[in-house]
Amino acid sequence: MASVGVGAGVAAEAAPVARAATGRLLFIDNIRVFLTVLVIMHHLTITYAGTGSWYYLEGRQDTVVDALGSWFCAVNQSYFMGLFLLVSAYFIPGSYDRKGPGRFTKDRLIRLGIPLAVFSWVVNPLFCYWFFHWSQKMSFWSYLTGQYFAGGTIIGQGPLWFVEVLLIFTLVYAVWRLLAPRAPLASVTATPFPRDRTMALFAVGLGVAAALLRIPFAIDAYWFAPLDLQFGFFASYVALFVVGLLAYRHDWLRSLPDKTGRRWLRIAVLMILLWAPTVVALGAIDNDLPLKGGLHWQSPVYAMWEAFACVSLCIAVVYLFRRHLDRRGRLAAFLVPNAYTAYLIHAPIIATLAYESRGITWYPLLKWLLAVLIALPVCFGLSALIRKIPYTDRVL
């Protein structure tokens, strides 16, 4: 997304941005916490509204729960993991510049590769064995070899697919830097934020790319089994990772004009409100498979809604956090360093919490709220305890 002649006066409208003592942008760290919380809430919504696949589904549902759960999860899916990749990519070029290829790659393999391997080959199989097969008196080894890996998935199970994708993208970036011509790279060359027209064209391109990708790789119909990946979502994942790299070089996240942020915030609200009439008009009440890909006219229409929701929500979140949450109080000082570990450990925690409370016969939305209020402090609290273990600070 190149700059298109925005005047310096427009860029200057952006609010001043605070930095931590380490030089990190405070609002970006807060966005990471927000996205981690949203992931936990998203998976609890799947648990109680049955809007996807998860370790444990409550199975008690009515029209209201189904509609609200589907709405919440669809809006999240349109942007939150892509934005996660964007803000993660934002710090990669500077880190590579400071450390060089060898140390950079080693650090990424430690911080991303070790948690990915431990979760995929130790934590997740042990949890799944206890959760699903303990009462069947099957040996763990029989479960591991006969069922856990039977589907062909080698690594990246559960929520750690994101860590896997981030590691792959990061290593591709490192290889590209090694092979690219050694042109001098300034750490930051401030350029105006792209115009609305440029962003709209980017969204259109994103929608077209997603629709084309979903012809062979329809959502929920195709997984790349060895790495447990759904390629149907990768148009936005790849694009937003690249945007994150460019955003660092061009200082776009700090130069986003308030006027632009407010405009795309309004578009984001519109996209959120348009989800329900869009899926109704596309016939998803009776059958949502045509929305997910293949040679169905509904797929590109839904992909275009998803693309504009993605772009508008990403801009809106950056604007809101930079404008209103660009600080680090006592709560943020606790949450920020523990967000990564909370993401890594949340799946077995919330699945166990939901399963153990299955006897509570409250309305699903009330149970969801209770689970959120319990799960968030438990995940972040356990994260803080885990990070006190010697040597974990090198990884977590």
Image (spheres, grey):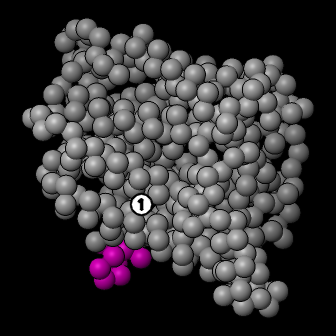
* Residue 331 appears in the picture as rendered: no
Front position in the image: 243 or 12 = 243
Q: Which residue is drawn at the image coordinates 36% and 35% (left, top)?
A: 242
Q: Which residues are magenta?
A: 385-393
- Is 359 on the left or on the right of 213, as rendered? right
Image height of 138 relative to 207, above or below: below
Callout 1: SS: helix
- Is 325 on the left or on the right of 344, as rendered? left
* Residue 199 appears in the picture as rendered: yes
Question: Where residue 321 sits: x, y (%)?
Answer: 38, 36
Q: Residue furthest left?
A: 184
Front position in the image: 266 or 234 = 234
Question: Where residue 265 sits: x, y (%)?
Answer: 49, 22
Image height of 63 relative to 296, above or below: below
Indicate yes or no whether the magenta region holds residue 258: no
Type of amino acid under label 1: Tyr
**Residue that mark 1 sits on:** 340
Q: Which residue is drawn at the image coordinates 51% and 20% (left, top)?
A: 205
Question: Where residue 352 sits: x, y (%)?
Answer: 68, 72
Q: Which residue is drawn at the image coordinates 39% and 29% (left, top)?
A: 319
